[in-house]
Amino acid sequence: MKKRIFRGLRTLLFVLLAAASLQLDLVAPAVQAVTQADIDALQDDADELSEQRAELENQLEALADDKSQALARKNLLDSQIAATSAQIANVEAQIAQYNTLITQTQGELDQAEADEAHQMEVFRQCVRAMEEGGTISYWSVLFNAADFADLLGRLDAANEIMEFRQSVVDDLRALQEEIAAKKADLETQRASQQEAKETLEATRADLDQQRAEANALVAEIQSNENEYQDALDEIEAEEEAIQAEIVRLSRELAAASGDTDVALGGYIWPVSSRRITSPFGNRNTGIPGASTNHKGVDIGGVGYTSEVHAAKAGTVIVSQRSSSYGEYVVVSHGSGNTTLYAHMSSRSVSVGDYVDQGDVLGITGSTGISSGPHLHFEITENGSRVNPLNYLTGYIQAW
């Protein structure tokens, strides 16, 4: 009986060492970059954006065919486009996080399956040990003990062997349950990711439709001057008020800093395109009644993703949306010297930011009174707008 118990103890020690080896081999820092809670938070934000879009749609329907509310309708369309663009960015972030989460879960599944294989080997060793050592009889332990101390020693040894064998089985069962759970998680995550991809495609289609509707509205305003004269007058008045405020802010900033010296010129192209679709000054767009005194130049050959760069170093004095310019930014380069960047789809700077020449100010778009993606660019020197093409060379004439 003693030989059997000692043989069991020897086998127990061997198996314990094998199990310890398993733990040492598989211990690794478990750091998750993404959790389902992170994705749930994004989905909550997406729900809020959907509610915003629905509310804007209701407001747009209320203004449908009301020519006196043309500018209000365009502003709502721009807001709707912004909400849809934000929703697209949100869903793209969800998809990216699902990619990370799926990779993490797959790695955890691979590790669990490796653990299971190792634990199965420990289980097989236990079974072989039982076959070699025979089963332990508690009655035999009781009646063959030489004394009470011997009995306690025999019982402790037997219990340790039985408890370890049971722990091996329990650990194996736990690993199998973990594997099943990880496989279920993977299936759910992949299905959710596919759903997000389908949502993304549908939302992109919505965005294209909204942009087309916004551009068509502006084209209608520009081609029907008589019907929309009030709107056109409002646009003109707003632009002049904005210009006066720009000059005031620029001179006020220079006075506050004590730097009244202005070095004019030195501008670079604000976008990669050199295609001028509308020049500075009097222009005829080809639309009856739409000849106007253009206060800057329109640079085409851009879409809804082109970066807008600071043409010259300076301080941002305006970063906001208006009915006429849409999303626009103004940078001051000294007293009365500014550059304006209009109709952007988004802005990436705030008032007070100092920007170096070439820094990104935003992304091109078609917000405000714009019938297609382009950048409206203005230069003001000594408080008056000047022709940017006096400084920007190598342009392509496309008007």
Image (tube, rainbow, N blue to C red):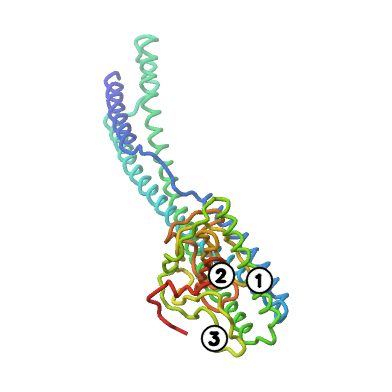
The residue carrying pointer 3 sits among few (fewer than 14), some (14 to 19) or many (20 or more) residues within 10 Å by Cα, namely: some
Name the residue carrying label 3: 285
Quarter that holds the N terminus = top left
At 73% from the left edge and 79% from the top edge, which residue is drawn?
68
Name the residue carrying label 1: 238
Quadrant in the picture for residue 163 = top left
Quadrant in the picture for residue 292 = bottom right
Quadrant in the picture for residue 127 = top left
At 44% from the left edge and 52% from the top edge, which residue is drawn?
101
Asked if the residue at tag 3 contacts the one at tag 1, i.e. Cβ–Cβ closer than 8 Å, the answer is: no
Q: Position of residue 76 (x, y in %)?
A: 65, 70
Q: Position of residue 53 (x, y in %)?
A: 63, 67
Asked if the residue at tag 2 contacts the one at tag 1, i.e. Cβ–Cβ closer than 8 Å, the answer is: no
Q: Earlier in the sequence, mark 2 or mark 3?
A: 3
Name the residue carrying label 2: 384
Q: How far, Cα to Cα, is label 2 from label 3?
A: 24 Å
Q: Nearer the viewer, mark 1 or mark 2?
A: 2
In the image, what residue type sits under mark 3?
A: Thr
Q: Is residue 167 left or right of residue 345?
A: left
Residue 210 numbered mark, or none: none
